[in-house]
Each structure stands twice: as structure tokens, then as C-alpha cells.
């Protein structure tokens, strides 16, 4: 592993199903983030975690939950998927030092039918 | 509300120079970032400006004017691989990142 690994790369999901997007980083970064990216819109923050054991809500948290049991893993769960959650999801991390530059995973493309 | 404005799409010629503008209205300012995102890939960090002026990094330069709420990304000696979307993001007074929708840059031979 080098950087951030996201899984799955893509998924088609029926509405109402539960789905967990996985994110793992090997850079020992304290902070981790989940964004969604939709055409014509800027990246929108769903949830974040400044350090293991803590999480916070971003701009669009409804319908999503996260956990941060350890430094490396930050899964995002959709409890009951809806079509409006069709999007590309990016996990990111940062060391929160200096400029606090984000390193992104390759993304997970989710389609909810 | 908070807002980041960038042109939706720009076209330029290989070998030329292009300037991508970004204007912002945010509650406070704690830095401005430019990221590059190739189609189907993750955004990658290009530059960071927190003080007024020009930051140069190889073929890429980024300029900031805090009084005007304005930044630009300047790409010189354009190459085909520079075809990508360029994302402008501002860190507000709460240190939250506000993202623009991105500028898709098309490079023609």
C-alpha cells in the first residue's frame, strides 16, 4: 500500500441497501476526510476525523456515518442508500501540518438505482 | 454564503500559456490551494498561497491577491498531459476547505 486505498472502485447498488466504502492510509496521517464529487459542483465534505477516536460532520452528512477506530482506517457507511447518493466518493488524509495538504484516494464510483 | 468561482472550461494550444482564474467570497481566509485532477483520477496538490504574490513551481505559477479575493494559476509551455481539471479551494476562518467546481482545461495540438 502506498498512500490511500479505497474500495470498491465502483459499485452499483439498489436503493435501500446498506453499503460501506472502505478507506485505508499508510502515511500515519492524523486527519482523514470523506468527500463526494458531483458534476458541476465542487468537492463537498461529508465527514471528517481529526484523530483516531473522533469524528465530525461536514457540509453534507445526512444519510452517511463514519467511524475511526484506528489511525489507518476510515470507513464510510450508507445505512439505506438513495439515488441522490449516486456520486464519486473520495477519501483523503492530511498530517494537519503547515498548509495541511490533502492526499486523495483514487475514488469510489457509486450508483444507486 | 461562501462561493468560489472558476470558468467551467478553457481551451489552449500545446506549447502556449494559459491562465485559470479563481475568485472567492468566504468567511475569512487561511490559504488558497490549487489541485489538478485528471479525468477519472484523484485530485493532486499543485500549489498553496497564503500571502499576496506569485509562487512559482516549474511550469506552474500561482498568484494571490487577498484584497481582491482573486487567484490565478498560470501554466506555461503547455503539454498534452496538462489536459485536466484544475480545482481552486479556499480555507475559511474555521479552517474548512471550500472548493470551486473546477476548470476543465483542454489542450489542442
Image (tube, coloured by chain):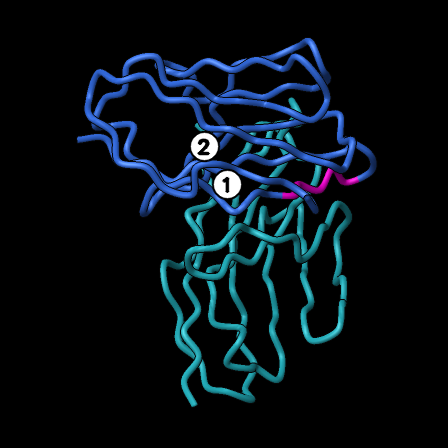
Image quarter where the C terminus of chain B lies is bottom left
Query: In this view, which residue lies farthest toward the front?
Result: A1
Would you place residue B80 above or below residue B7 in this image? below
Mark 1 burial class by Cα count in 10 Å: few <14, some 14-19, many 20+: many
Left or right, B42 with reference to B107: right
Q: Residue at x 50, y 40 (%)?
A: B99
Image quarter of residue A18: top left
Judged from the image, the secondary structure of the residue bearing numbered disc 2 is strand
Q: What secondary structure is found at the residue carrying circle 1?
A: strand
Q: Residue furthest right?
A: A98
Task: Locate the N terminus of chain B and report the quarter of the image it occupies.
Answer: top left
Mark 2 residue crowding within 10 angstroms, few (<14) / some (14–19) / many (20+): many
Query: Which x, y percent locates residue A108?
Result: 42, 40
Task: Give the residue drawn at x 52%, y 15%.
Answer: A66
Residue drawn at x 52%, y 50% as measured from the top left: B42
Above or below, A86 against B105 in this view is above
Residue A101 position, x and y percent, is 71, 42
Q: Nearer the viewer, residue A98 or A1?
A: A1
Q: Which residue is mark 1?
A: B99
What label sits on residue A44 in the rendered view?
2
On what subunit does the disc labeled 2 rest? Answer: A
The chain carrying label 1 is B
Q: Main secondary structure of the magenta part?
A: loop
Q: Identify the residue shown where x is 58% and y is 46%.
A: B69
Q: Which chain is cyan?
A: B
Q: What's the colour of chain A in the image? A: blue
Range shown magenta? A99-103
Q: Residue A83, percent across and down?
A: 21, 27
Q: Are marks 1 and 2 in contact (CB under 8 Å)?
A: yes
Amino acid at each position: 500500500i502506498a498512500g490511500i486505498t479505497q474500495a470498491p472502485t465502483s459499485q452499483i447498488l439498489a436503493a435501500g441497501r446498506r453499503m460501506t466504502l472502505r478507506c485505508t492510509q499508510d502515511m500515519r496521517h492524523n486527519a482523514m476526510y470523506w468527500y463526494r464529487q458531483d458534476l458541476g459542483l465542487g468537492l463537498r465534505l461529508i465527514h471528517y476525523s481529526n484523530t483516531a477516536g473522533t469524528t465530525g460532520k461536514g457540509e453534507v452528512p445526512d444519510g452517511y456515518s463514519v467511524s475511526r477506530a484506528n489511525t489507518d482506517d476510515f470507513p464510510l457507511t450508507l445505512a439505506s442508500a438513495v439515488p441522490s447518493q449516486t456520486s464519486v466518493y473520495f477519501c483523503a488524509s492530511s498530517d494537519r501540518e503547515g498548509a495541511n495538504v490533502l492526499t486523495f484516494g483514487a475514488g469510489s464510483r457509486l450508483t444507486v438505482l | 454564503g461562501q462561493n468560489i468561482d472558476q470558468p467551467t472550461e478553457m481551451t489552449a494550444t500545446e506549447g502556449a500559456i494559459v491562465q485559470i482564474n479563481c475568485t472567492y467570497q468566504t468567511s475569512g481566509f487561511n490559504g488558497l490551494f490549487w489541485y489538478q485532477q485528471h479525468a477519472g483520477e484523484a485530485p493532486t496538490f499543485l500549489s498553496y498561497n497564503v500571502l499576496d504574490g506569485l509562487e512559482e513551481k516549474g511550469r506552474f505559477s500561482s498568484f494571490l491577491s487577498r484584497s481582491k479575493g482573486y487567484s490565478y494559476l498560470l501554466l506555461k509551455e503547455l503539454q498534452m498531459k496538462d489536459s485536466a481539471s484544475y480545482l481552486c479551494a479556499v480555507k475559511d476562518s474555521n479552517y474548512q476547505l471550500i472548493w470551486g467546481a473546477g476548470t476543465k482545461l483542454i489542450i489542442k495540438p
